[in-house]
Amino acid sequence: MVGESNGVGESNGVAGALRRVGGMTRRSFLASAALSAGALSATLAACGASQDAGGAGGAGTGKASSRDYSPLTIDSAAWRHDADNDIYYQIGVPYCLDPVATAYESMGIYVPGAYFSATANSDGETYTCKVNDAGRQGAYTARTAPIVMPVNTAGYSAQKAPSEYSAKGLSDYLSAGLVYVYAGCRGRANGENADGSTFDGGAPWGATDLKAAVRCVRYNDAALPGDKGKVFTFGHSGGGAQSALMGATGDSDLYKPYLESIGAVMAGASGETISDAITGAMCWCPITSLDVADEAYEWMMGQYASGGTRAEGTFTKALSTDLSSAYVSYVNSAGFVGADGGRLQLAEGGDGSYAAGTYYEHLLGVIQGSLNNFLADTEFPYTPSSQTKADGGFAGGGSGGAPSGAPSGSGGPSGSGSEGAPEGAPSGASSGAPAGEPPSGGESSGATVGAASGGAGGAGMAGGGPSAGSSSSSSSSLSSGSATYETAQDYIDSLNADEAWVSYDATTNTARITSVGAFVRHCKGATKDVGAFDMLDKSSAENSLFGDRESDARHFDQTMVRLLADNAGKYSQLSGYDASYAEAYAADVKTTDALGVEQTVRQDMYNPMYYLAGNSAGYGTSTVAAHWRIRTGIEQGDTSLTTEVNLALALRQRTDVTDVDFETVWGKGHTTAERSGDSTENFIAWIASCA
């Protein structure tokens, strides 16, 4: 976890000699030999080196495997062709020798027709294909085309492998010249196959499966079009989190026993190491950094709430306060730095607990910048619209693509309505509009808000949302109303209806925000109970993520373990306390999975910051993606804004990361948020800028 170790020197070794399969603890792991300066330099050089078919280079996976991976060779005579869209495809392609989840551990591969020279087979259905090196689609050739992999795993749910072909949504990617690989992967839950056999879910199996797919694609370099050194993942919500993991954990030796257990490709035909590192990660609303997610949620949002589990006199209110304080300690030891190189920290004072200091000012600047981007981008009159997505709805999964009528993720308004949250939605999300009354002074549907109007009031943005203190389990999409604002001043007046917290200069069309607390009260109220990610009853998606073969859900928040133990006397005097909480949390974090790996190590494996932050033990033990694009809807109540802010800060401090394109989008909630344009088109354009 970030803040545990003393710096870059503490690591696990690039050569892969220090991994454990059977029960190495965090303590013994940290006691392993430190990474030498020479090895670290070699690692970073490998990160920036030219990529060949063997992979992205970097941290390495130890001695090459002696297994025969030839059964994973793609059959060049098994391609099918969609003539209408000129797409060659194969589905049901295995990516590991020993799959345990039959509906998940395979992939679909979709290739632009120009990249193959094809001969029809005698069966009248399939084609024998050879890579046409001269083939060109868009800006790419068959050998320079980037490869994209969607991660459609909201709430860390499973991504079922495609079992039938559908062109829906694929043309955007393939017409741009991209090769599209849709790999199934396990999710947070244990599962059962059609034959009654069972398989383990939870961390780290989802990312393990995706890594195995990347390795298999690289193993088949000669038979597949596309530049295997230009692999990009993209995902939303839990999928955004796992896209971030793919970007942060390349070639991490912690994954080696898991990869080997399913027969993932570890070496090429000539014995060369095969890499699972990727080139770039697109992350919309990533629900990640789960080691401090509960703490961040209470510091940014929970401390400004006063109802439900945060009501005075409840033990959970006291727990909320203590979690918030723990987040302060985390920030002040994390080593974040700002654009000027100065240390970012929290200090006492301001509108709330530790609502001051350089870290606070940085966060305030992010929020203010988001509002000013909105003012620059928006043409008035303006009517807010709800855009909340439970999953990405990405193409390639069979009959998939975005559900009919689902939000497109475009930056501009695209109608009202909110997509319901299917199974796998982030914990705390629900379908429909946010709970809570419409804002006082707001206008009814279709009304026009003029200068003399009372404005939005209440929750600030049209549509209301949970009032401060709400423990509603609805998604925070606060721009869900249909009031129309004639001018930017009208809109700002609506934000200030209950308290003045935004000042506006019409001559420059810019705004200033006075406090993070005011922003939270008006735009980003808490929508989850205390213990937002590690619930007291183990009911969150993240509790399932850290379950194991013996229990489908486990507690995992080590700070909550400590607080419940240290403050039992204080908490027991308040309502709602049960002594069994402390026992349950303490027991769960000590468990091991089927491979004998402690839960605390699995947490590290599923925490991008463990690999990215300079003061973490995992720093220098993976090959980190060079390119990152992070987008989040600023209104979402699914996680603290600090989640994405911290991810961007850590990435920008690394010398092996080429660029970090980070924006938080005003007026958007938990969706594939964009300032303008379409999320798919923007993603494709970003790849072109990287490739």
Image: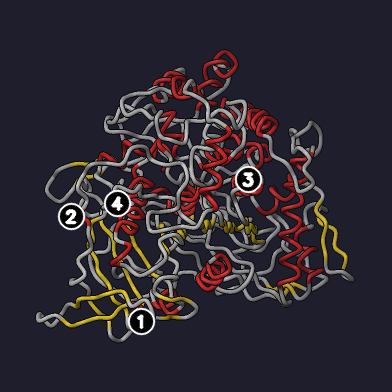
Secondary structure beneath dot 2 equals helix
Q: Position of residue 531 (x, y in %)?
A: 52, 34
* Mark 4 neighbour density, 10 Å: few (under 14) some (14–19) many (20 or more): many
Please tell me whether residue 303 is drawn above or below residue 682 in the rendered image.
above
Q: Amino acid at mark 2?
A: Pro
Q: Amino acid at mark 3?
A: Arg
- The residue that label 2 is drawn on is 71
- The residue that label 4 is drawn on is 268
Residue 223, disc:
none
Q: Position of residue 341 (x, y in %)?
A: 77, 43
Residue depicted at 63% across the width and 49% down the height:
648
Secondary structure beneath dot 1 equals helix
Q: Earlier in the sequence, mark 3 or mark 1?
A: 1
Residue 114, disc:
1
Q: Position of residue 93 (x, y in %)?
A: 23, 61
Please tell me whether residue 410 is drawn above or below residue 52 in the rendered image.
below
- The residue that label 3 is drawn on is 654
Q: Rounded to the nearest whole Å, what is the CA distance between mark 2 and mark 3?
A: 39 Å
Q: Amino acid at mark 1?
A: Ala
Q: Earlier in the sequence, mark 2 or mark 1?
A: 2
Is residue 178 visible in the rendered image? The answer is yes
Please tell me whether residue 138 is drawn above or below residue 664 in the rendered image.
below
Nearest the eye: 579 or 152: 152
User: Colour scheme in the image?
Assistant: secondary structure
Q: Earlier in the sequence, mark 2 or mark 4?
A: 2
Question: Answer yes or no: do the residues labelled 2 and 3 have beta carbons within 8 Å?
Answer: no
Q: Earlier in the sequence, mark 4 or mark 3?
A: 4
Nearest the eye: 616 or 195: 616
Q: Rounded to the nearest whole Å, what is the CA distance between mark 4 and mark 3?
A: 30 Å
Q: Rounded to the nearest whole Å, what is the CA distance between mark 2 and mark 4?
A: 13 Å
